[in-house]
Image (spheres, rainbow, N blue to C red):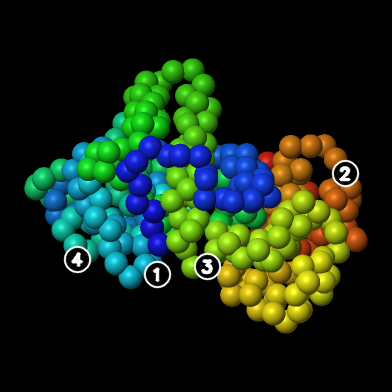
Amino acid sequence: MPLHSGVPHRAVSALREPWEEDLFSNLLRSIRVRHSVYFRPTFAAPWGIRFEGTVIHFHWVVNGSCWLSVRGMPEAVRLTAGDLVIVPRGKPHVMCDPPGTAPADFFELTRAHKLDEAGRFSAGGIGSRTRFLCGGLELENGATHMLLAVISPLIHIKGHAGGAPRWLEATSNYLLEELEHARPFRDTVVTRFADILVVQAVRAYVNEQANQVQSGWLAALRDRRVGQALALMHSQPDERWTVAALATRLAISRSAFAEKFTRLLGESPHRYLARLRLNIASQRLRTTDDKISVIAACAGYKSLPAFSKAFKQEVGVSPVEYRRNGDGLHQN
């Protein structure tokens, strides 16, 4: 379910318990964009473009309008001037005007056209024009980041037609301003603006959707037992949590807990805990000089070989390579 938001964003009042707010506060603090790339295309109708890859994509409609279709979503979404959309999980998606136009690969277009220093280029036909600020973002913890387990395939924040929130217009305009001029440390500045953009969009999503979505993290938090299980795993990730141990702590049968957890989150408690531990480990590999054996133990692994095998399966490189390369995202 996409998020539609055109009102100023309140505090996350939909989260009822302190442990719920703690979980989301930790999530928001952990969002850090490692690399970002930006383009400023202008398309003249008729046109169609498609995006694929493993990164987070965002598109801000500077002016004009178009249709957006995300694979797995039943209906296309109409975008108008000022709208922001974020496709958090790198899902393939198509933007076009009018609907049904055969899409070209966006990155093939960027290679075929001469881009200026601000990433501008033009393509399409001879009809009405739509301008975008488009970006691709890699999170520092890459494929292990817990953000990927939380939010929907699409966040849509309405712009001018819905009374754009101040932060959206301000952040997007600052990004455009920085991209326009080759100032010192521009890449660092625009990456930090990307952090703000993602954090604000996720906060808006949580605030609007906490009581509506039927599956995923937000739905799990509404279930007291599953939500408390998440809180336990996040607060003590090195504990040897099993389905039986969690069920006992929560006073629920093992089978009922496992079924409910998997139904709400789309993966077993064991799988969720493994990703959580690897997320914590990848952050420590990136930000500390701790020995890998110490990081493995703090992440709940009883042996270094077991940790190294699990890490490579999830991230695509070994812990040593991850630390040496400073690479938080495995490229497929």
Circle nearer the viewer, 2 or 3: 3
Q: Where does residue 250 sit, x and y in percent of width and height? A: 77, 67
Q: Which residue matches tag 2?
A: 291
Is label 2 in contact with label 3 (beta carbons under 8 Å)?
no
Q: Which residue is drawn at 50% across and 26% down?
A: 189
- N-terminal label among 2 and 1: 1
Q: Which residue is drawn at 64% across and 50% down?
A: 17
**Quadrant location, the C terminus:** bottom right
Q: Residue furthest bottom?
A: 255
Q: Where does residue 182 sit, x and y in percent of width and height? A: 41, 21
Q: Distance between the residues labelled 2 and 3?
A: 38 Å
Residue 72: image tag: 1
Is label 2 in contact with label 4 (beta carbons under 8 Å)?
no
Local SS, label 3 = loop
Kind of residue indicated by mark 3: Ser
Q: Which residue matches tag 3?
A: 215
Kind of residue indicated by mark 4: Gly
Circle nearer the viewer, 3 or 1: 3
- N-terminal label among 4 and 1: 1
Q: Distance between the residues labelled 3 and 1?
A: 15 Å
Badge 2 crowding class, 10 Å Cα cut-off, few under 14, some 14 to 19, many 20 or more, is: few
Is label 4 in contact with label 1 (beta carbons under 8 Å)?
no
